[in-house]
Amino acid sequence: MSSQWEAVIGLEIHTQLSTKSKIFSGAATAYGAEPNTQACAVDLGLPGVLPVLNEDAVRKAVTFGLAIDADIAPHSIFARKNYFYPDLPKGYQISQFELPIVGNGHLDIEVDGETKRIGITRAHLEEDAGKSLHEDFHGLTGIDLNRAGTPLLEIVSEPDMRSAKEAVAYMRKLHELVRYLEICDGNMQEGSFRCDANVSVRPKGHAEFGTRAEIKNINSFKFVEKAINHEIERQIDIIEGGGKVVQETRLYDANKDETRSMRSKEEANDYRYFPDPDLLPVVIEESLKAEIRATLPELPDAKKQRFIAQYGMDGESAATLTSSRELADFYEQVVTESGEAKLATNWLTGDVLGALNKAGLEIGDCPVSADRLAGLLKRVADNTISGKTAKQVFDKLWNGSETADEIIEKEGLKQITDTGAIEAIVDSVIAANPGPVEQYLSGKEKALMALVGQIMKQTQGKANPAEVNKMLIAKLKG
Amino acid sequence: MHNKTLSELAAGLRAKQFSSVELTHAFLARIKQHPALNAFITISEEHALVQAAAADQRLASGDATDLTGIPIAHKDIFCTLGIKTSCGSKMLDNFVAPYDASVVDKFNHAGAVTLGKLNMDEFAMGSSNETSFYGPARNPWNTDCVAGGSSGGSAVAVAARLAPAVTGTDTGGSIRQPAAFCGITGLKPTYGRVSRYGMIAYASSLDQGGPMARNAEDAALLLQTMAGFDSKDSTSVDQSVPDYSAGLNDSLQGLKIGLPKQFFSSQLDNNMAAAIQAAIAEYQKLGATVQEVDMPNLELAIPAYYVIASAECSSNLSRYDGVRFGYRCQNPADLTDLYTRSRGEAFGAEVKRRILMGTYALSAGYYDAYYLKAQQVRRLISDDFKRALSEVDVLMGPVTPGTAFKIGAKTSDPIQMYLEDIYTIAINLAGLPAMSIPAGFIAGLPVGLQVIGNYFSEAKLLNIGHRYQQATDWHLQSPKGFE
């Protein structure tokens, strides 16, 4: 971006609430069922049927509101958003318009070491639409209403972000939060967490916003960054070329890495919102707020600060280890069982996450359970095995079901602590390698490594390398 | 048999004077004898006889209710599992619901027999039954006259003794006005008293199902079964249902009747005014006192109603798009063509008019001036009623400005047609219960007296209706040829 321009970005994020049944009907919400097998009369919008609000969706929305320190409306209203589309069975979507359930909260993000507060204007409950299937129907469109009526919480930010990087940081932070709160599974492939971005640019220092474009349907962190950056460039090009940005809705095409116009402001629907007469106002009593507040888990920021203070780790490790509730819980279990906070930090942020990444697994699917990992760390801590041997043992833990102690025992990996035995081997290696000994004594430090290697080989790696080094130098120089 | 009241029929069934199957056959025969009345859209003969046979078994086994084996019929707005539910529209001429409305379900559980589905204005939009895709139901008192609407078929069926009692729905007068025109008793309960689940929506915040019967005593029996909380309808009220028959004979000594000044203005036809005054005089004889009450906002009811009802219907009827059920046009060229032709070909003129009005009222830039303003007026009207009903026990007045008019007389002038509901509409806006009872005749056509009560005062209204019917015989008159 040329330095005279500043981007202004706000995000609307649709999170699918992980309730068992739909927001206004008893049909199941599980993903991936045969088309139209999870759509009841209410979801189909048959004549005469009526919506009944799912209380669990309300509780999840309130949970979110409390977690972002927002106002919870004591009285909120469902409204109908009217438009025709084949996958919208009633011809209107039940949403919230004038009085949303959550208003005026915030989320702190960290970009380049700086903390920035992003305002959250509102979060409202609504039902999802179905899906139009354009393939497999030879010129016709198929409709799958399994998703129709799935509860969504639409979270609308203030236009507080100034770069794609900030937008991604905000989106990640929100993604982390909803999973912490266990109100959304966060599965972006299945559409459980979807993002629309409002983007505009203005000359730096100007208070007034430029004309914005809304980019729809950007469903990965990578695409959000690319789509926003692309859109910022597009708008700057237009303005610098003497043109005017048009208010419109644009669709991001991940394959071509470009946004294209969907509809202009003039073509935009008049949704004719009005309060849904089939549903009563949602009343949230103070007692319900108190009850939900009492069940709130420790939130990511608080947990991160606690990890730094309690386990003496750096900020980066703390951020990594608190990036999901499962990972943080796993870490703390390892610490509790091993008593080794520092080792646990190093192992989790290093080998364990590395191995998970490579295998494409989440911490919940880690083949090495917290107590098996703790068993390994205990043996590292008490010098039973070396760090190098520990990596071999970890591989075996990953691929099998034995404990670290069983592996060490079976494979005879215990370090030799008998100095007499090591001394004998050191002596024999010095005797058998006059060349390297000569080189070392004439000042070639590297020659020492060859000797250490020989010794380690003869002890099958079970000697403590630091011990060996010390003893060898003492003997050679003595 | 067809002139017996519900309790007489129930007693006859228990005493084995006749079986439910015989009773059902008798009413089916009467229905078939009078096709010209056009009261029924669907006659569910086979279904009815199966239900009747089951009812006879239940009667024999001794676990019968007051309605077991009694034939009834439902306005074709209530969804019925396996029986067509058209809502009076070409749009749903092919629609068979995969569920029963909660009201239908309750009658089925009680063991009542469903004779069929009754004619009505299309999607309950009309005051004469003339907007029905199936043609108007005809008034048995004069078959050149309208039956009223929208529950026209319901009123005709009871008046012509084609069914002992039926269901109806009332959004702006659709139970009370046809009841008045056809000389029967119709009760619109408090909004939320009867479940709306499975009752096809016209204007959700106003729609309410209720009983239509020969007299208040029968209406009480019907309402007993219909009323009650339903977890499937969020707007139904979780309040216990009283015994509606228990207080029917309570004394009316000291009853305070309020007469809204605005109901008795110069616009009211002289003959109608005289008939209503005579009915009120009868109540004074029964011990009631009368006073005038002022309800200054009543005259705003019609415009407020047509904005709110149209707005809600424009949204409620969006689901009829030709995609999943109902009418679908031939060979649509594309999606827009599918929508516009399916809706254009299957909705009648009045339905289209209200969808257009409602869409306009909700549009950006007009919402505040129309919808929001109408909601404010609605509040003012409710306040008028609350104030009046804090001074008196009930309000009384006419149901309609005049008696049943000739078929076709008002179809070309929607405003004239809308004014038909001038005395009934405000009650729906306030959500109050109100009843129409037969109170005389003008030139051979029935007159209805309207009794309006406070929220959940249905038992009181039925008591007031019953005592009047003990003292008068208007409700016992039969139209000529249908005795």
Image (cartoon, grey):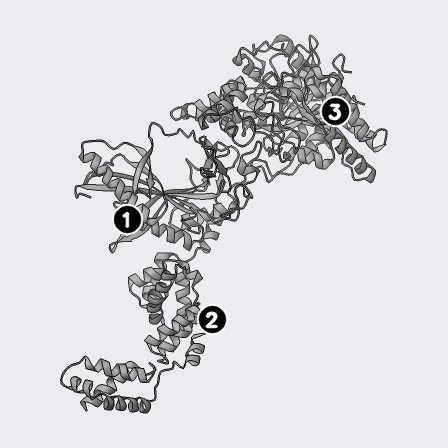
Would residue B117 be found to the left or right of residue A467 on screen? right
The local crowd at label 1, few if under 14, some if 14 to 19, many if 20 or more residues have their Cα within 10 Å, is: many
Would residue B441 be found to the left or right of residue B16 on screen? left
Residue at the spot 59% in from the left edge and 9% down from the top edge: B409
Quick check: marks 1 and 3 in contact, CB under 8 Å?
A: no
Residue B164 is marked as 3
The local crowd at label 3, few if under 14, some if 14 to 19, many if 20 or more residues have their Cα within 10 Å, is: many
The amino acid on which the numbered mark 3 sits, given as a three-letter code, is Pro
Q: Which residue is mark 2?
A: A401
**Residue B247: percent from the left, percent from the top?**
72, 31
The amino acid on which the numbered mark 1 sits, given as a three-letter code, is Glu
Quick check: marks 3 and 2 in contact, CB under 8 Å?
A: no
Q: Chain of mark 3?
A: B
| Quadrant of residue A256 within the rendered picture | top left
Q: Which residue is mark 1?
A: A166
Does the image show residue B42? yes
Residue at the spot 72% in from the left edge and 25% down from the top edge: B165
Viewer-side label of 3, 2: 2
Q: Earlier in the sequence, mark 2 or mark 1?
A: 1
**Residue A166: percent from the left, percent from the top?**
28, 48
The correct choice, above or below, for B420 with respect to A291 in the image is: above
Whether labels 2 and 1 belong to a single chain: the reply is yes
